[in-house]
Amino acid sequence: MFGISSSGKEQIAKIIEDMFDSIALQFIGDIPKLKKAKSLVISSKRNLGLSNLFVQAMRNKAPNEIESDALKSLLESAFGYVESLKSKTKTNVTERIDGLAKEARMRNQKIDENEVNLVIAEEMAKAKSHMQAIAESEATKLRNLGTMMDISRVASSVGDNDPTVFFVVVKDGVTCKECMRLHLMPDQVTPRLWKFSELKQGYHKRGEDNPSAFGLHPHCRCTLTYLSQGFGFDKNGMLSYQGEDYSAYRSQRKK
């Protein structure tokens, strides 16, 4: 039996696109369609979504060409996730409504508008949940990328080509075990030190021995921080100056 017409499917697709773009704006912000953009516009103004988060992580410094290119690459990735979810949502809605139309025709009835609205509401609720997960994951990546770029600038100014870094951990009742394992020493107090070259540049998988520069999980609250030469940690895990030739990284790795 025939379902909805091609024009009907186009109308449904348009409705879903408009609703979907509203959700995307709510969670991620204004991501331009980078494939068609000739340049990447970056501003420190509020409400520009992921780009603004990146600039804030760089302490509001204007990104140079290399930093802008890195940001553009991650924004393209985020945009790809959004478009993929939009396409899947449109397909799910169209197929479900098409099924309702075929069933109605078999009963020689008109399609129930309430059932159509219910389908749209259910699929958009699923999309909203997935969009929130995308937003949290990409926000963590962009924030940490901006921090990495800022650390690179500071380290480069003192001739440090492979900076020593650590993650400041928010320790409370909801801190995950993976963050405690990779971001702290066995005493669960002293930050664990890493070289930039040791950090993964992609998503972290639970159980891996090296942390990701982009965070261990969506909405990770651990903050990447630069350790200047000569500094280390006291017994309470607080930064303290140890001496010009002291290397806290070498000290940790000998243990």
Image: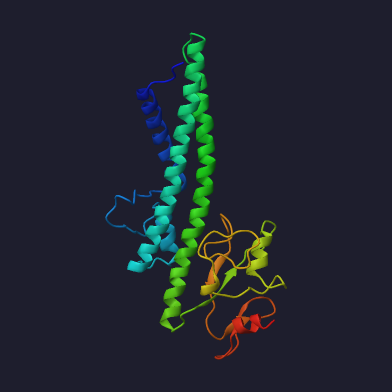
In the image, taking residue 180 as reference, residue 18 lies left or right, namely left
Residue 243, picture quadrant: bottom right
How is the model colour-coded? Answer: rainbow
Q: Residue furthest front?
A: 1
Relative height, residue 120 to residue 153 (above, below):
above
Relative height, residue 7 to residue 160 (above, below):
above
Which residue appears at 64% of the width and 84% of the height?
251
The x, y position of residue 97, in whole percent, is: 48, 24
Instruction: Please indicate, yes or no, whether residue 64 appears anywhere in the rendered image.
Output: no
The x, y position of residue 2, in whole percent, is: 43, 17
Relative height, residue 153 to residue 48 (above, below):
below
Q: Residue furthest left?
A: 38
Counting labels gives 0
In the image, taking residue 138 as reference, residue 234 lies left or right, namely right
The x, y position of residue 48, in whole percent, is: 39, 53
Of 252 and 45, nearer the camera is 252
Residue 237, picture quadrant: bottom right
Which residue appears at 49% of the width and 50% of the height?
135
Q: Residue furthest top?
A: 108
The x, y position of residue 128, in whole percent, is: 51, 40
In the image, taking residue 9 as reference, residue 103 lies left or right, namely right
Relative height, residue 26 to residue 66 (above, below):
above
Which residue appears at 53% of the width and 35% of the height?
125
Instruction: Please indicate, yes or no, whether residue 202 appears anywhere in the rendered image.
Output: yes
Q: Quadrant of the C terminus?
A: bottom right
